[in-house]
Image: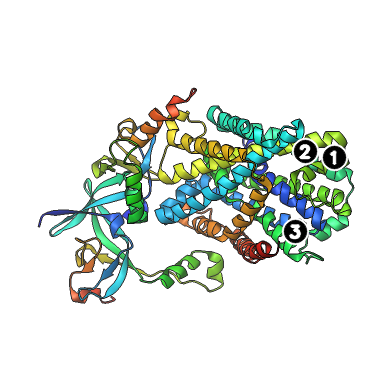
Amino acid sequence: MYIGREILDQQLIDRTGVNIGKVDGVVLELRDDLPPRVAAVLTGGHLLARRLHPRIESWARRLTRWWGPRSHDPLRIPWSRVKKIGVDIRVDVNAADVLSWEHWVCERIIGRIPGA
Amino acid sequence: MGVIEVRLEELLGRVVRSAAGRPVAVIQDVRARPEGDEYLISEVILGELGFRARLLRMLHQLPTFRALGLGRPYRTRPIPWNWLDLRDPQHPCFRRATQSEEP
Amino acid sequence: MTKLVQIALGVFTSIGGFLEIGAIATTAQAGAAFGFQLIWAVLLGTICVIFLVEMSGRLAAVSRHTIKDALRERFGPRVYMVTLVSDVLINLMVLAAEIGGMSLALQLVTGISFQWWAVPVGLLTWFVLWKGTFGLIENGVSLLGMVAIVFVVAAFTLQPSLHEIGAGLLPSLPSHRPLHYWFIAVSILGAAISPYLFYFYSSGAIEDDWDESHIGVNRAVAVIGMGFGGLLATAVLVVAAMVFHPVGIEAERLEQVALLLSQPLGRWGFYLFAATLFICCLGAAFELALATAYSFAQGLGWNWGEDVRPRDASRFTLVYTIMIAGVSLLMVSGIDPLQLTLFSMALTALILPLVTFPFLILMNDRDYVGDYGNGWISNTAVITISLLASLLALVAIPLQLLGG
């Protein structure tokens, strides 16, 4: 399996079929005298901004300092929770626990409009 | 030395240097094989350096240009994982001088 | 039989994507200034967009990815971001023109200045997206969009010379005002081959849950849907050629274009023109707002879908909400929607290869389309027409800015 082609930038889906995000990063564990192992996938945080350009990342950090959900760390999903790799990547995670930005937008903005 | 974590997305696209410091190739991808519950990296796929090679690759991917003789397939080669030192993702390099020669 | 109903997606895409204020304005100007001479531009644009729409549907049906989704996965975040930024900028301009178009249609009918209509029109567009489902909007616009057939009816009543129309199908050099001629040709190509149109279509195919069994239907829908749009645009050009060209009316302002149907069809023509303009611009507004929200959501991995409740796709909903709100408020200031439209069409033509080449790479990549990859005709047609449109734009735009 080619990690760059088949895992990075693919869509992550939770237990119930809800979109969680794209794989923005993959953590590799380098070990002495043993092949590196695929440790986790990452999504969110400022990873995407960082991959575009470091300056864009600092700009994004400044912009979100005052609003948005409190935590801006990327979500780390251990490889053991990756269940199925196909059209998209299914992970054993609950969307309700992890979608901080989506929930923030829902609570603060969209949820306040009648009929949401 | 223990265990070090590096990010794949920081490795992709980086220039790989020989043990002597000469730029040799670019990291295209990594290949992993399942071992039990784990996926272990078996090879690092290296690609050609240079903008021209990438431009020719793009042209080659469109059959119309290919039929006109424009474009060239992008050359990649798989390198065993232990030939490369990836501890510093900004400066990946070959461990030993002889290994960076073209096979 | 149920598969035939899918034609609604094609017709909807066509009405909103093809025949909107940009297409109406440019084809009316083309007919007024050059008679039947520019029909070839409409034909070329129609052919290209048929291929592109068919490809979008095929990609979605086989790979279960939309174009934007696949662009990020295949080419990475940098390429995706470049397409996102250019999309958003152009979509904003075109949406402004469509809100303007709807407001102008209401101004024609009520006499109340279009600036007052911008916010109500924006609210209507937003509300339908907020409450409606994809199927409802798709079928609604397709049905209501049938009013555009009035252009074909008008064209018939004017009894144009078929011989002259046939001559117009072949590209010809202009006898006067060459700069204007080529600029209008470029604008027509940009109006017809709008990226938001086929980005929207690929998302629509996923919304309608297409799979490999829809490949044949997709082909029919693309040809019939976009062909229909091309036919309507040609009808506008023909009517303008018969009504405006002989008396030298330029059709530069909407008040002039509005008279397009008044000669052949009298008072009814005037109201039908306003109705057609309104519905086509409404369809376009839906497509543009959704296409932009899709662009964000599909590349960034958000939950999305018109059938999903707003609270379950909050960020997706936020994008189209902000877009519509921002643009409507902008149009209150009274910017001329026609000028805005022409500029964005020409720009679209200029960057066309940047949009189509990555898409074509996807359509020739077995990992995405398996055995259903592009044939040589699709590849060659799209590459050729994209390059042609871009080269023409590269030459015509600076000359128009300097001379026009």
Residue at the image point whose x is 62% and y is 30% from the top: C120
Circle 2: residue type:
Phe
Mark 3 to mark 1 CA distance (whole Å): 26 Å
- Report x, y in % for residue C314: 43, 33
Circle 3: residue type:
Trp
| B81 left or right of C393 in image | left
Chain where mark 1 sits: C
The answer to whether C308 is drawn above or below residue C326 in the figure is above
Counting residues from the N terminus, which is met first, the one under dot 2 or under dot 1?
A: 1
Question: On residue C40, which mark appears?
Answer: 3
Q: Which residue is mark 2?
A: C273
Look at the numbered disc 1 and give the secondary structure of its residue: helix
Counting residues from the N terminus, which is met first, the one under dot 3 or under dot 1?
A: 3
Q: Specify the farthest residue to the top.
A: A114
Residue at the image point whose x is 35% and y is 71% from the top: B49
Residue at the image point whose x is 23% and y is 74% from the top: B21
Q: Specify the farthest residue to the left.
A: B1
| C267 left or right of C295 in image | right
Look at the numbered disc 3 and give the secondary structure of its residue: helix
Circle 1: residue type:
Ser
| B98 left or right of C248 in image | left
Question: On residue C262, which mark appears?
Answer: 1
Quadrant assignment, res C164:
bottom right
Q: Residues within 10 Å of mark 3 (few under 14, many from 20)?
A: many
The N terminus of chain C - image quarter: top right
Chain where mark 2 sits: C
**Do tag 3 and tag 1 residues touch (Cβ < 8 Å)?**
no
Q: Is residue C201 visible?
A: yes
